[in-house]
Amino acid sequence: MKFTDYKYEHMDIEALQEQLKAICSKLQNAASYAEFKNTFIELNDVNKYINTNQTLVDIRHTVDTRDEYYTKENDFLNEMLPVLKEDIVNCNKAVMASTFVSDLRKEVPETYFLQREMEEKSFDPIIIPEMQEENKLASKYQAIIASAQIEFDGETYTLAALEVKTNDKDRDTRKRAMQAYWGWYDEHAKEIGEVYDQLVQVRTRMAKKLGYENYIELGYYRMMRFDYNKEDVENYRKQVLEDVVPLDNELYARQQKRLGYDTLHAWDEKFEFTSGNPAPKYSREELVKRALKMYQELDPKTGEFFKFMTERELLDLDSKPGKAAGGYCTFIPNYQSPFIFANFNQTSHDAEVLTHEAGHAFQVYSSKDIFPIDCVWPTYESCEIHSMSMEFFTYPWMKSFFEEDVDKYYFNHLSGAVKFLPYGVLVDHFQHEVYENPTMSPEERLATWRKLEKQYLPQKNYDGIEILEKGGWWMRQLHIFMDPFYYIDYTLAQVCALQFWARIQKKDEKAFEDYKHICKIGGTLPFRKIVKEAGLKVPFESGCLKDTVQLVREWFENADDSQF
Ligand SMILES: [Zn+2]
């Protein structure tokens, strides 16, 4: 069987609503645990059925956005899924209110119940109008970004295409591309600032309606954060400032010296080597072949997994007309299949897809049999650990992708990992300030970003780009608009992945066994427990970052970049 044989069914929403209402009443009136449990299984089957069809539409629509049938189905589901959500939440409430719930707790992972608690704290039909408005505003932001048509050197570019030019080998091209890129944001700063202001207002209203002081607490519940709170994050931020920022400053200084520049301008930051950034040497077809060999050599389990992916054609990697931008990994429950979507562009990004996205896919492939479906994936707070760690576990095979560029790849990848941490924390810190002070004006928000940016990213030199000096960088960060507070997670996962990297450096044989173990347990445990199961330290613990950063620093001290 191949992906093209996976059958999509147009769902009968009314029939599903009827079925869910019947399930709800059976859960409420179950006379025995056996009856209750069977109904719970039925609910799980309905969830899997909805999820399967929704995912198939998502994939087929994004693979070809010009396909009329799946575009229509996509619109249909966007409208109908919130309607079904209410019925599903009612069933979930019936589960939690049942006298049999204590028996269920013995059979079902704790995270299932934690999810239900978060759901109850973050959802009530009274906020449906705000949720709909929020969706509209988020789509408006996306539409503004997608509408960008920027003239550059006689051609018209989208923001994503122009971004590639901002990393060009030629310094003057980089500078002009960056000025054109941010010039567009400067022209649209008022419009984007207003959309964001409306998003902040509507989210604050949502929070107040549910009885919260501001959006922060609600935001944490909506993100299903079981395991840490604002105070943990504050402590973690301090560690990033104390332990990571100094190392990054050294790396930027070294980069500037390597490039032979007097000043490291904003347009030089992503440009690591005068000889150009490392890129894989092969076509998509050849890279996939090499990835298969890599995963077969890494471990029998990863070999079996990647063979499944290729045989069933669960990788859509080529960039082609009509295909949506970006990349993702998803899971199709009724076919127990992960799926990887990407747009290969002949840069190191292609290798990241075959390691990072494949890490997500391997995780979900390993946990696909977990019951109920709600616990197959880890929640956001944990899910990037598996993907980011796979980037490090596959290091020994990167020569087969990058050939003579492989040492540049290691240098670039590891410095990218530690340079990312303060940025990720900044994105999170900014949002705390914003939602704590929802009456800030758009100008004050810009100033707030710039003030924080100076702490976390002191190397930034915005000479020649006015909007960035004013504090406009955050306008390009999609998550700030679409998924508030979803960002710190990436940095926490990066710290976990770096700990795996450190264990690999020390030839710790158990590292990959621990990795496979946490892939297999999927979303059955909350963040801190997953990290413990992995044999790693929780990033909030004082000293955790210091130890990890020390090892990274030593690696760089021993790395010779004079030949790059
Ligand atoms: Zn990811």
Image (tube, helix red, strand yellow):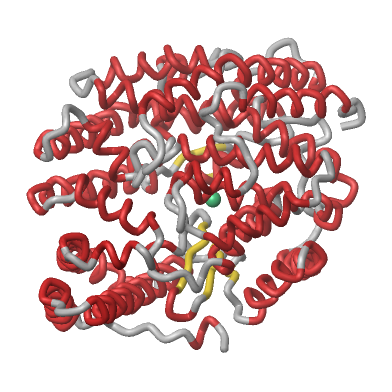
Does residue 273 appear to the left or right of 233 in the view shown? right
Does residue 189 appear to the left or right of 22 in the view shown? right
Percent x, y of residue 208: 12, 33
Quadrant of residue 545 within the rendered picture: top right
Q: Nearer the viewer, residue 157 or 248?
A: 248
Quadrant of residue 498 within the rendered picture: top right
Q: Answer yes or no: is residue 350 visible.
A: no
- Where 414 falls versus 98 (above or below)? above
Does residue 248 appear to the left or right of 184 in the view shown? right
Q: Residue placed at 18% from the left, 67% from the top?
A: 91
Q: Residue placed at 48% from the left, 27% from the top?
A: 425
**Image quadrant in which the C terminus is located:** top right
Percent x, y of residue 150: 46, 40
**Image quadrant in which the N terminus is located:** bottom right
Percent x, y of residue 116: 27, 55
Quadrant of residue 46 within the rendered picture: bottom left
Q: Residue placed at 42% from the left, 20% from the top?
A: 467
Q: Answer yes or no: is residue 457 visible.
A: yes
Percent x, y of residue 345: 65, 54
